[in-house]
Amino acid sequence: MTGTRFGLPAWRVRPAAVPGGPPPRLAGVIHVSDNLELRLARGRSDVRAAQALRFRVFHQEMGAAMGGRGLWLRRDIDRFDRFCDHLVVVDRARGRRRPYVVGTYRLLRGEVALRRRGFYTADEFDLRPLMSRAPEVLELGRSCVDPAYRARGVMQILWKGIAEYLVTHDIKLMLGCASFPGTDPDAIAHALSFLHHRHRLPEGLRPRALPERYIEMNRVPADGLDADRVRRQTPPLVKGYLRLGGQVGDGAVCDPGFNTIDVCVVLPVDAVKGRYVKHYYRDGEQAAA
């Protein structure tokens, strides 16, 4: 965070419609500073700019494998994009002719997932323990920030938008795949074991890695954990989820296509509200007034 005080004027966007359901409630756009604007993608140009950012971060920077249409288009594309809301931070100074997206999160509400292709996370984890609550669930995914903007608090800006989205759609639970770089579980053995011993969901709510992809997380005994190794091996975004009260499922999954090892994180919104949701949403209401 750069220390800038962010104004939050009134704004409107159209979240993804639910087929056969009522019209979506309107939200808006948060003008974070003179040049950075937070909004839900307004159309194809915003989505394509978000996909281009994802390509730069995931494939060029992090070494994910990309083939087919996405490679020659230089965009990270998958079958879920058309059914999701895309939260974007746009640098308006660089996007006079077309949007220049510098941060993004992909949001998939459970009521949409149930009518479409399910959750992306279900490709790696068995989500049946949570499916009875699917209409209250929001899946978070594809989060990334342009390297040149990582010192400008873009991730915090994105969470302002997530906070309002949670309130607007009465979300009770968030979930998604949180990624560790690389595909060697032994290289992150202390971090995985720390999650297993200290941050697992209760058994009745615990998603489990699919059998054919299951990687054991319990690799170091609880009394053998090294705190320094845990800190070094845990990515900042995973640490952030844990600080917000996130817990993980059973087992990890190797995703060679993205050059990552994934864990399933579940985050009850009630655990977040006191720290973030009410704070951001209240600020937005005051500024709009």
Image (tube, grey):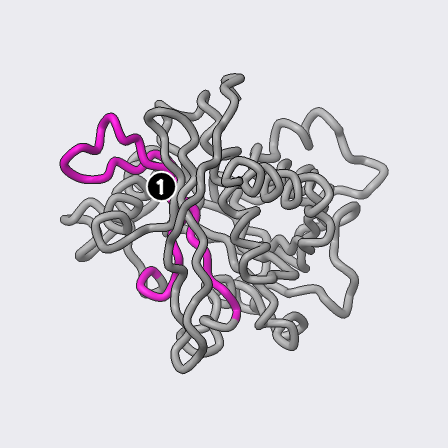
Residue at horizontal 66 percent and vertical 44 percent from the top: 278
Residue 173 lies, in percent from the top left, at 64, 60
Q: Is residue 135 above or below residue 47?
A: below
**Along the line of sight, the residue nearer the viewer: 95 or 63:** 95
Tell me, yes or no, whether the highlighted magenta stretch contains residue 100. yes
Q: Is residue 56 above or below residue 210?
A: above
Residue 224 lies, in percent from the top left, at 81, 35
Residue type at numbered disc 1: Phe
Left or right of 253 in this view: 228: right
Q: Secondary structure at mark 1?
A: helix
Residue at horizontal 37 percent and vertical 43 percent from the top: 88
Magenta stretch, residue numbers: 81-110
Residue 142 at least partly seen: no
Residue 60 lies, in percent from the top left, at 29, 36
Q: Is residue 141 above or below residue 191?
A: below
The residue that label 1 is drawn on is: 58
Left or right of 233 in this view: 142: left
Residue 10 is drawn in which quadrant?
top left
Residue projecting furthest to the right? 223
Residue 275 at least partly seen: yes
Residue projecting furthest to the front? 289
